[in-house]
Image (cartoon, rainbow, N blue to C red):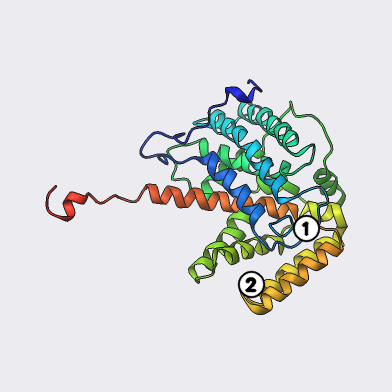
Amino acid sequence: MSADASTIVVTDRLFPSPRSFPRTDLVGLARRALLDEAALSPKPGLVDRRGNGAHSDLSFPLMSRSAIAIEPWFGKMCAVARGAQPNHRLRMQLGVVGRNAERAMFRATGGVNAHRGAIWVLGLLIAGAAMDPRDRFTAHAIARRAADLARLDDPSAPRTVSHGSIATRRFGVSGARGEAIAGFPHVVQCALPMLRSRRRAGAPENVARLDALLAIMARLSDTCLLHRGGCAALGAAQEGAAEVMEAGGSGTSRGWQRLGRLDRRLLAMNASPGGSADLLAATLFLDAVEHTCAASQTPQLNPGAAYGTS
């Protein structure tokens, strides 16, 4: 597989069959999910439009540059996974592309890790969506296929040690790979239902997305928090997120006050729920895929029929 980004063609017609998600750009939806996650404000401890959160080396403009730099490699993942079956060959191909995406990210950010976790999460989900273009692209089906890929080892992957892997071993949590192998339960079972229930209740989109993030934070053993502040940081994030939700969510006066308190507490601990942010991006991606697919399946009215002229 070539590592030359100039050979990659990203198209908005990845699935030309009319039964298979017509004119939907999975790659664009992934980039949009990363940009929307970064822009969402106020996120406790995280980079957003207000500032850098608990990160001295990250910013909203830098996160945006990273998302744009990654986009062509998401296109390559989509291309190699299209119509494929989950096997070791595909897993190795995706691994090569993913490592190229990381290199592109580091070039765009001057060596700062902005989206390494998101490349893993969204890369698997993009591949899961592309593997069967006859599917109706439900979140559960995509997550299930992504899990099939995550269970496979990539023998060509370098044996590097990451902060997440250290936290996984030290604290005995499943980490990003465990989340993927389980079929992204914090996305499918927690965040997506929260996002959609808030919308149905008439909440503004910003509130719905913040509450989806808090639903993840309240339950996830986030290795980013564990790496930065150990069990104390994880406990503060989980308890604080649960308190916001118990107060009615970020759209209520009491919930908003508790959200601000949680943000200040995480900043004081220099703790950032980066794993939760990656899963929020996954939530926004799967939500957009399902929404676009449903819209594409809606029968179109023949204008002439409405006037008896067809």
Residue wearing tag 2 = 249
Location of residue 68 by image quarter: top right
Placement of 166 over or under 251, stated as above or below: above
Return the residue nearer the eye: 201 or 70: 70
Give the x, y percent position of residue 277: 69, 54
Return the residue nearer the eye: 168 or 199: 199
Q: Amino acid at mark 1?
A: Gly
- Tag on residue 111? none
Placement of 245 over or under 37, stated as above or below: below
- Tag on residue 53? 1
Placement of 289 over or under 229, stated as above or below: above
Q: Is residue 118 left or right of residue 299?
A: right
Q: Is residue 229 left or right of residue 208?
A: right
Q: Amino acid at mark 2?
A: Gly
Whether residue 279 is visible: yes
* Residue farthest to the top, as pictured: 2
User: Which residue is painted at 17% across and 49% down in the image?
Assistant: 304
